[in-house]
Amino acid sequence: MARWLKWIVILILALWLSMLLLCALLGWLIGRATASPLCPDGRSLIFLMDQSGSMARELDPQGMRWQFAEALISALRKRPQAPSQIALVAYGTRPQVLLPPTVLSGARIPLQAPEMGWSDLIGALEMAMTLSDECAIWILLSDGVPQTAEQRDPEGHFPLLREQLRAGRQQGILIVLVRVAPPTAYTWRAFQKASPFWQQMAEEGTIQLFHLHESHDIPDLVGELLASLSQPSSLMPTPTPHPKIDASPTMPPRPPLEEDSLQTPIPLSSPVAPVRAETHRTKGSLSLLIPGFLGCLLFFSLLRICRARRPRLPGELLLITDPKGLSGRRWDLSRIRRKRLTLGEDLDPALPRSAAQLELRPDERGTTRIHLIPLQPGRVFQEERPLQEPIPLQDGDCFRIDGYLFRYENLKERIERWEPGGPGWPLM
């Protein structure tokens, strides 16, 4: 009966633990579905405006990039989910913040800025990083040709530039390059050198690449950019280990515009950044591990309580003498956690085997007590009388088996038997 009861308890605990894990899984799924966005205050938009000599004098003397920035801000102000604030960094020989982070509704950007010399794009990205968090969007308006007085070859800037762009993307920053590319730009050798690099960055998902050819393309390009940012796939990079790149510069085909592309809402206030998404999965795993750990802890605690409540032999058994003389060995029967044991087989192999057992059983009055059960007649004696039937043992009872003299001791019985003022504490 006790064995069946044990398995019933274990089955109930296993079902309870399964229900606990199921509830934890449902809570985790509900939490994922109702989780607050990573950027509750919305994205911040940072313009990086190229004011190098090649842009200001040759490729874009009419200021198409400034007109594009103004058109994009005007379109965003009409959106219900627009960036919370914008900033503008102009760069040439060195970067300069022309517009610090400002609320979108009150932001006013200049329509032009003076020429600033070389094109230190790496320095501009470093300054943009100081203004950014994982909720930022970088809009680069440039010909994509980095040059400095120390390194005039654009290819010398690409290794460090690649690291900066990938690091920003891994932090969750969306990076968009609007490459100012009038028809005359494709005859410029430095422009041709930079084309494969930016194409590679776009193919591996680090940046989104657009081309601005003429000023009349600005409305369509703004619509393309907004439609692209509204796609969830644009928020998650898909790295390409070894993309095949054509060295000859080409104009990428533009995707067809939808009629209502300008009215498509942009999820700028609820982006999905790759690093943060991994953090959410980790938290979801922890939400499953904690209830599971608590359930296992409760299971083993209940199992330990059941074992502690299981009947066990009380008292101690003292070996007074053995065939070699005085012994003094002692066994604590309560530590064995059993209600029946054979002296030679279960207690100590050196004791006589198959001679006697100690077992918990009720006596004539119905009280559960420890009994001495002789297994073979003529081997177990008490007060020089051979035992044929089981007898209850009390504190201080002695018995002999094959030349081994034992005494049973029960401290609890001894305390109950002793009365204050009596003859004193019995001999222990």
Image: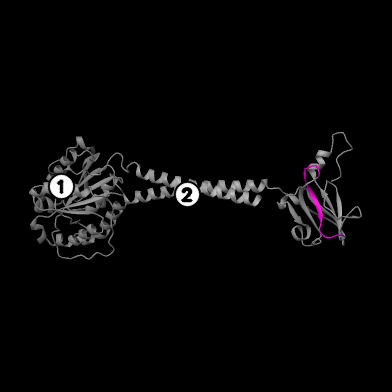
For the residue labelled by badge 2, is the local secondary structure a helix, a strand or a loop?
helix
Position of residue 210 relative to residue 105, above or below, is below
Q: Is 292 displayed left or right of 191 in the figure?
A: right
Q: Amino acid at mark 2?
A: Leu
CA distance for labels 1 and 2 = 46 Å
Q: Is 291 displayed left or right of 206 in the figure?
A: right
Please report the bounds of the magenta region as a residue range. 364-377
Is any part of residue 88 visible from this angle? yes
Q: How many residues crowd mark 2 within 10 Å: few (<14), some (14–19), many (20+)? A: some
Question: Where does residue 356 sit, x and y in percent of width and height?
Answer: 81, 57
Q: Nearer the viewer, residue 422 or 45?
A: 422
Camera-nearest label, 1 or 2: 2
Q: Could you tell me which residue is drawn at 31 percent across and 53 percent down?
A: 170
Question: Where does residue 364 sit, x and y in percent of width and height?
Answer: 81, 44
Residue 373 within the segment the image draws in magenta? yes
Is any part of residue 157 visible from this angle? no
Q: Residue 243's quadrant in the figure? A: bottom left
Q: Nearer the viewer, residue 138 or 284?
A: 284
Position of residue 232 relative to residue 189, above or below, is above
Q: Which residue is mark 1?
A: 223
Q: Nearer the viewer, residue 119 or 228?
A: 228
Question: Where does residue 95 sit, x and y in percent of width and height?
Answer: 22, 48
Q: Could you tell me which residue is drawn at 19 percent across and 48 percent down?
A: 227
Q: Which residue is mark 2?
A: 289
Q: How many residues crowd mark 1 within 10 Å: few (<14), some (14–19), many (20+)? A: many
Q: Amino acid at mark 1?
A: Gly
Q: Earlier in the sequence, mark 1 or mark 2?
A: 1
Q: Nearer the viewer, residue 177 or 264?
A: 264
Question: Where does residue 62 sit, x and y in percent of width and height?
Answer: 8, 48
In the rendering, which numbered label is found on residue 148? Answer: none
